[in-house]
C-alpha cells in the first residue's frame, strides 16, 4: 500500500533562516546527506534510486506538478545493493536523469524538512507532511504543510511545481 505525503518545494535565498527556525523549534536533525538521485524511464509516475550517506532507497511516486501543496503517493524500498540495482534498472528502463544535491534533513513530528543545495539550480526548501509516522488524513497533512509555509514566510512566487530532474532536463530557471 502506498504512503501519502503532502509536500511543497520552494526556492529560497535564506537557507540559514530556515535552518535557524528548525533549530529554535527543536527539530530533530538527521544530518547532511550528499545524494545522487538516478531517475529511470517509466511510463507512469517517477522511479528514482536515491544513493546517499543517510538515505538509500528506491522510490516510486505519482505526483502532479503544481506549485501549491500537492499530494504524492509513494512506495519506498530500502536498498542494500544500490550499484547492482542501478545497473539492472539502467539496462531495463534506461536512465532519464541524474540529480546530485546536498541535503540537510530535519523532522518535527511527522513533518520532514529538506534544505537542499542543487548545483546549477540553487537553494530550496522542501516540506513533506507524511502519514508514515502519524495516522493523519490528507486534509490534516495539508494543514501541516500550509502551517510551515506561513511560518517560513514562503511566498507563492517561490513555490516550484517541478522536480529537480525536470528543471535540470529543461535547463530552466526554477521560478
Image (cartoon, rainbow, N blue to C red):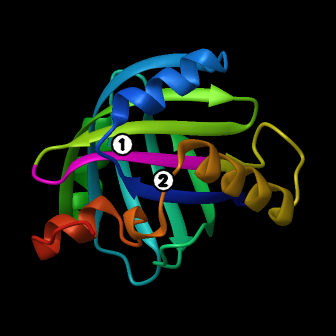
Residue labelled with disc 2: 59
Q: Residues within 10 Å of mark 1 (few under 14, many from 20)?
A: many
Reply above or below: 28 against 150: above
Q: Is residue 81 visible?
A: no
Q: Is residue 100 visible?
A: yes
Q: What secondary structure do most residues of the magenta stretch adopt? A: strand
Q: Where residue 33 appears, x then y in whole percent?
A: 34, 25
Residue 165 covered by magenta stretch = no
Please give the name of the residue rendered at 47% of the width and 75% of the height, measured from the top-left corner. 45
Circles 2 and 1, Cβ within 8 Å, touching? The answer is: yes
Please give the name of the residue rendered at 43% of the width and 65% of the height, measured from the top-left corner. 159
Residue labelled with disc 1: 50
Reply above or below: 148 against 83: below
Q: Nearer the viewer, residue 39 or 8?
A: 8
In the image, the segment drawn in magenta is 120-128
Q: Secondary structure at mark 1?
A: strand
Amino acid at each position: 500500500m502506498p504512503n501519502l505525503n503532502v509536500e511543497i518545494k520552494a526556492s529560497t535565498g535564506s537557507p540559514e533562516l530556515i535552518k535557524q527556525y528548525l533549530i529554535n523549534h527543536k527539530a530533530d536533525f538527521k544530518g547532511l546527506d550528499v545524494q545522487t538521485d538516478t531517475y529511470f524511464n517509466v511510463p507512469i509516475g517517477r522511479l528514482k534510486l536515491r544513493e546517499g550517506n543517510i538515505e538509500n532507497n528506491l522510490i516510486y511516486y505519482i505526483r502532479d506538478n503544481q506549485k501549491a501543496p500537492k499530494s504524492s503517493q509513494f512506495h519506498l524500498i530500502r536498498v542494500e545493493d544500490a550499484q547492482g540495482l542501478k545497473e539492472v534498472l539502467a539496462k531495463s528502463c534506461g536512465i532519464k536523469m541524474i540529480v546530485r544535491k546536498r541535503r540537510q534533513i530535519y523532522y518535527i513530528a511527522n513533518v520532514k524538512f529538506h534544505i537542499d543545495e542543487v548545483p546549477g539550480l540553487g537553494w530550496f526548501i522542501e516540506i513533506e507532511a507524511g502519514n508514515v509516522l502519524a495516522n493523519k488524513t490528507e486534509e490534516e497533512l495539508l494543514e501541516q504543510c500550509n502551517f510551515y509555509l506561513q511560518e517560513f514566510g514562503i511566498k507563492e512566487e517561490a513555490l516550484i511545481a517541478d522536480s529537480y530532474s525536470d528543471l535540470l532536463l529543461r535547463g530552466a530557471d526554477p521560478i
